[in-house]
Image: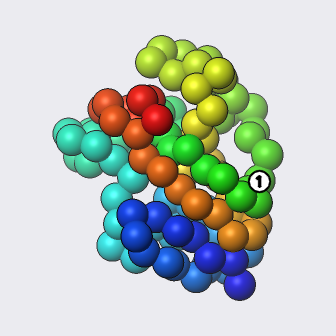
Amino acid sequence: MPTVYYEGEEIECEEGAVLRDVLRKAGLSVYNGRSEQLNCRGMGSCGTCAVKVEGEVSEPGKKEKARLWFPPHHPSHDVRLSCQTRVMGDVEVTKGRGLWGQHV
């Protein structure tokens, strides 16, 4: 079983689980400030669940790639949308500053 490391916590999950769902199930948030209430609920359109991920995860899909081209994100920021990222092995997750977590 893969392990997700986030904010000092270690969470085991099924391979292929959606990262946002894994963290929410563990009582952890991938949102900053008001984006906790104002987000797209995992649809991949708002970009507020962006995190830096190191480890084995799925490749970004079309929807995620498209969203990461819009400000305040940019593909050079090296972040992923946790709602579109599937955990394939052990991963370390870091949430950046800013409403969208864009400052990693």
* 77 horizontally vs 34: left or right: right
* 94 horizontally vs 86: left or right: left
Residue at the image point whose x is 39% and y is 52% from the top: 30
Of 20 and 40, nearer the camera is: 20
Q: Position of residue 28 (x, y in %)?
A: 35, 66
Tell me which corner region of the image, top left, top right, bottom left or bottom right, holds residue 39. top left
The relative height of residue 37 versus residue 8 in the rendered view (above or below) is: above
Query: How dense is the environment of label 1, judged by Cα within 10 Å: few (below 14), some, or many (20 and up)?
Result: some
Answer whether residue 43 is visible to the viewer in this image.
no
Residue at the image point whose x is 34% and y is 35% from the top: 97
Residue at the image point whose x is 44% and y is 30% from the top: 102
Q: Position of residue 87 (x, y in %)?
A: 68, 64
Question: Secondary structure under badge 1?
Answer: loop
The relative height of residue 82 versus residue 50 in the rendered view (above or below) is: below
The relative height of residue 13 versus residue 58 in the rendered view (above or below) is: below
Answer whether residue 97 is visible to the viewer in this image.
yes
Residue carrying label 1: 58
Q: Position of residue 82 (x, y in %)?
A: 54, 50
Q: Position of residue 70 (x, y in %)?
A: 54, 16
Circle 1: residue type: Ser
Tell me which corner region of the image, top left, top right, bottom left or bottom right, holds residue 29. bottom left
Of 65 and 10, nearer the camera is: 10
